[in-house]
Image (cartoon, coloured by chain):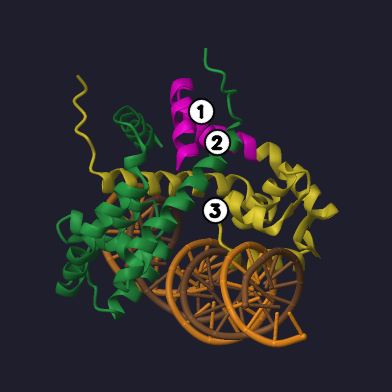
Chain colours: A yellow, B green, C orange, D brown
Amino acid sequence: MSDAAAPEPVDLWSAFKRAHEIVRARVIADTAEAAGLSEPDLTILVNLNKAGGALRQSELAASLGWDRTRISHQLTRMGKRGLVTRERAGGVTVTLTGTGRQAVSAVRPGLDAAVRRHFTDKLSAQEIETLSSVLRRL
Amino acid sequence: MSDAAAPEPVDLWSAFKRAHEIVRARVIADTAEAAGLSEPDLTILVNLNKAGGALRQSELAASLGWDRTRISHQLTRMGKRGLVTRERAGGVTVTLTGTGRQAVSAVRPGLDAAVRRHFTDKLSAQEIETLSSVLRRL
DNA sequence: CTGTTAGCGTTGACATTTCAACACTAGGAA
DNA sequence: TTCCTAGTGTTGAAATGTCAACGCTAACAG
């Protein structure tokens, strides 16, 4: 039998937050920081790019688990920096600008590498599968 | 064989961040919010309490994965609210006040319940063990 | 037409986090 | 002694996130 005592739920949650915090800091230090982008900038850019360059604002919020206000402020800032544009069409559609696309392409290789280095390379294939299924459920 | 395609590292990382964001929002809504504490307040209080009520500031930072500046500002705010005290002893030692202890005890049962409800109850014993081992490694 | 309700987004004030720059201390080397 | 160097903590300004309040639009009932 395994000798690991069942962790208290709160301790498991603390470990989760700590791991998130540490991996996040390392990945950002290796990517956004080097590209003159903030972490939220990068998060939005990658999500938009993955969706083909445009998304409804509410879908963007849902896919990140962010709330309306946070997305709104963030997009306002990114608009001023010329990374995205917004237009009303029923809801609001957010679109990547040329500058925005360029920024994603520039950072992407480094981001992939950093995520592998600080995250997935430390996990076995079996663990990745379990983790993936767990995260989907939360 | 499993038919789940191996997820791109970046996608797994996004899923990790999203799960963290969602669980965090739910737990906080059910606990700190109800107790007049902020999330970082609660995080610090729980950690200090677990350590017996006092810790070196740098140890607190390391155990949370936070950086110096963040801890410093946070403790300054909490000091003003009467939750902790600091004194210089080689490094700086942070101590829970009576008010601080009281606050932790008051929130603790609700916190345990919320973490179970939004997090561990959704995982099997097997998954908890895997997750626990993975998080330790990161 | 007049409400009413719900979804979606914005705004401004305030709280928290980050960033760059600055002390302070201890320890060792010149 | 003086001069590094590393580790630790603080400060103030700028960036980001949160909260409460508001406005807009569409759908629907009266």
Type of amino acid under label 3: Gly
**Callout 2 environment at 10 Å: few (<14), some (14 to 19), or many (20+)?**
many
Q: Which residue is mark 3?
A: A65
Residue A123 in magenta? yes
Helix, strand or loop at mark 1: helix
**Region in magenta:** A111-138
For mark 2, what is the residue?
A: B12
Q: Which residue is mark 1?
A: A121
Could you give the CA–CA distance between mark 1 and mark 2, rounded to whole angstroms?
A: 12 Å
Q: Amino acid at mark 2?
A: Leu
Q: Quadrant of residue A115?
A: top right
Question: Amino acid under label 1?
Answer: Asp
Looking at the picture, do discs 1 and 2 lie on one chain? no
As rendered, which of B35 and C20 lies closer to the eye? B35
x and y percent of residue B120 in the render? 32, 42
Q: Position of residue B98 (x, y in %)?
A: 14, 73
Looking at the picture, does residue B1 appear above or below residue A97?
A: above
Question: Alpha-carbon neighbours of circle 3 within 10 Å: few (<14), some, or many (≥20)?
Answer: some
Horizontal and vertical percent position of residue A120: 51, 31
Residue under mark 1: which chain is it in? Answer: A
Question: At 80% from the left edge and 48% from the top edge, which residue is drawn?
Answer: A101
Residue C1 horizontal side relative to residue A134, left or right: right
Q: Quadrant of residue A16?
A: top left
Could you tell whether A83 is left or right of A20 in the image?
right
**Quadrant of res A124:** top left
